[in-house]
Image (cartoon, rainbow, N blue to C red):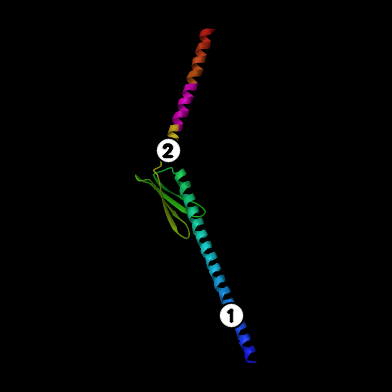
Amino acid sequence: MWKKKKVKAGVLLYAVTISAIFSLLLQFYLNRQVAHYQDYAVNKEKLIAFAMAKRTKDKAEQESGEQVFNLGQVSYQNKKTGLVTTVRTPKSQYEFLFPSVKIKEEKTDKKEKVVTDSSNQAEKKKSEEKSEKKENS
């Protein structure tokens, strides 16, 4: 009988040891999964903030201003060092620095000049053609 009790205790000890090892492995795996998800969430939020900042940079119309998105708010300032954008999301705040951006008003002025120049040239051609037709008649 004495030997049978040792065997039962050995089996019980083996089962407890295996369950402890399994629980440690499970705990390690679950902690890694939670950490991975937290990294994913932070990277996703950073990426969204960067996308909002880049969109603001592309659409900047003044020296400084503010844009509101569904997922946050962006304020920007065009300084000598570059365009400083501050993105505020519900969870955190990010700041991005882009190279200096020319204001869109200048670009639109140039486009208007090109359009008016081309329309002036078209009008001159029409008037020249009319004068040539009159001379030929």
Q: Residue furthest top?
A: 137
Q: Amino acid at mark 2?
A: Glu
In x, y percent, where is residue 34? 53, 65
The dot on residue 105 is 2
Q: Amino acid at mark 1?
A: Val
- SS type, badge 2: helix
Nearest the eye: 41 or 71:
41
Residue range highlighted in magenta: 111-122
Q: Main secondary structure of the magenta part?
A: helix
Q: Residue furthest bottom?
A: 1
Nearest the eye: 41 or 80:
41
> Is disc 2 surrounded by few (<14), some (14 to 19) or many (20+) residues within 10 Å?
few
Quadrant position of residue 60: top left
In x, y percent, where is residue 125? 49, 18
Quadrant in which the N terminus is drawn? bottom right
The dot on residue 16 is 1
- SS type, badge 1: helix
Question: How many angstroms separate mark 2 from mark 1 (CA)?
Answer: 75 Å
